[in-house]
Image (cartoon, grey):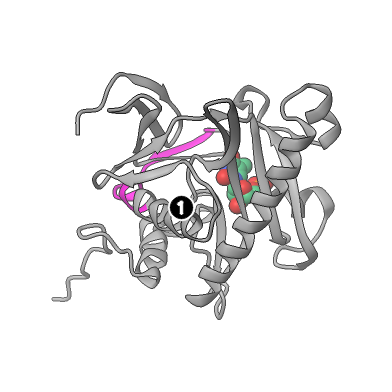
Amino acid sequence: MARGKKIYEGKAKILFEGPEPGTIVQYFKDDATAFNAEKQDVIDGKGALNNRLSEYFMIGLNHIGVPTHFLKRLNMREQLVRSCEIIPLEVIVRNYAAGSMSKRLGIEEGTQLPRPIVEYCYKDDSLGDPLVSEEHIAAFGWASQQDMDDILGLALRVNDYMSGVMYGVGIKLVDFKIEIGRVYEGDFQRLVVADEISPDSCRLWDLETGQKLDKDVFRRDLGSLTDAYAEVARRLGVMPKGTGPKPTLVN
Ligand code: TMP
């Protein structure tokens, strides 16, 4: 499918104009970044894995009535999505303490939280996506109270869906980040899950061994990132051909 003009290039994806008005082609790069792009690498196969995994999760969400921007996967690296206006917030849901929450509050990584905790960060790379409160969001007009009610509902539904799907394949959903888009339908607007849901934006730990199967493998230099993502894809039955671990040669 012919894609149109490049609209935006981010750290892990490129957006192009889609074939119909209101559509966008989302291209998954192999680039990996961490710590606001202080650490960077190109990891062969990551884009294809995230494209497939995000497709899998978004289709599942659509099936259970959680609206997403996803329309269809086009090829190994591209998917067609609805164009939407991204609300400038990273919506994080945490089931177990880890990462920045563990650091900020001194809670040991892996401690189960009394209930899922939702946090908001203001999406601004130049500021390092700072944590903000609903007071900031309301005062600066990033989202309305109605939007915030809808966002909380979406975030918790995604959490229940993702936790269940991952539990079914022996993986604990520690936390994740989603982005929310606004789509216009005539006089109406509604919020949908946008961007991507992949091991780049989740923490996924093997239930038995605690092995990390997400971007922390890259952030913390714990081994092969594609092996970790391919393991998630393999367990879910969405392993794309040609991205599996390379066979080990024994002489
Ligand atoms: P954090 O513990 O570093 O705040 O990360 C919380 C979750 O959000 C974790 O699943 C990783 C994800 N995340 C992103 O998707 N993008 C980011 O830029 C950051 C910092 C975290």
Point out residue 171 in the picture as x, y percentages from the top left corner: 53, 72
In the image as oriented, which residue stretches furthest toward the front?
A: 187
Disc 1 C-beta below 8 A from ligand 1: no
SS for dot 1: helix
Counting labels gives 1
Q: 85 above or below 49?
A: above
For the residue pair 176 and 72, the one nearer the viewer reads as 72
For the residue pair 88 and 30, the one nearer the viewer reads as 88
Point out residue 207 in the picture as x, y percentages from the top left corner: 57, 76
Q: 105 above or below 3?
A: below
In the image as oriented, which residue stretches furthest toward the bottom?
A: 208
The residue located at (17%, 71%) in the rendering is 249
- Res. 170 visible in picture: no
Quadrant where the C terminus lies?
A: bottom left
Magenta segment: does it hold 139? no
For the residue pair 11 and 237, the one nearer the viewer reads as 237
Q: Is residue 88 left or right of residue 131?
A: left
Quadrant where the N terminus lies?
A: top left
Kind of residue at disc 1: Met
The residue pinned by badge 1 equals 58
The residue located at (37%, 30%) in the rendering is 24
Mark 1 burial class by Cα count in 10 Å: few <14, some 14-19, many 20+: many
Point out residue 187 in the picture as x, y percentages from the top left corner: 58, 25
Q: Which residues are magenta?
A: 37-49
The residue located at (63%, 22%) in the rendering is 126
- Res. 183 visible in picture: yes
Point out residue 83 in the picture as x, y percentages from the top left corner: 45, 30
In the image as oriented, which residue stretches furthest toward the left?
A: 251
For the residue pair 8 and 2, the one nearer the viewer reads as 2
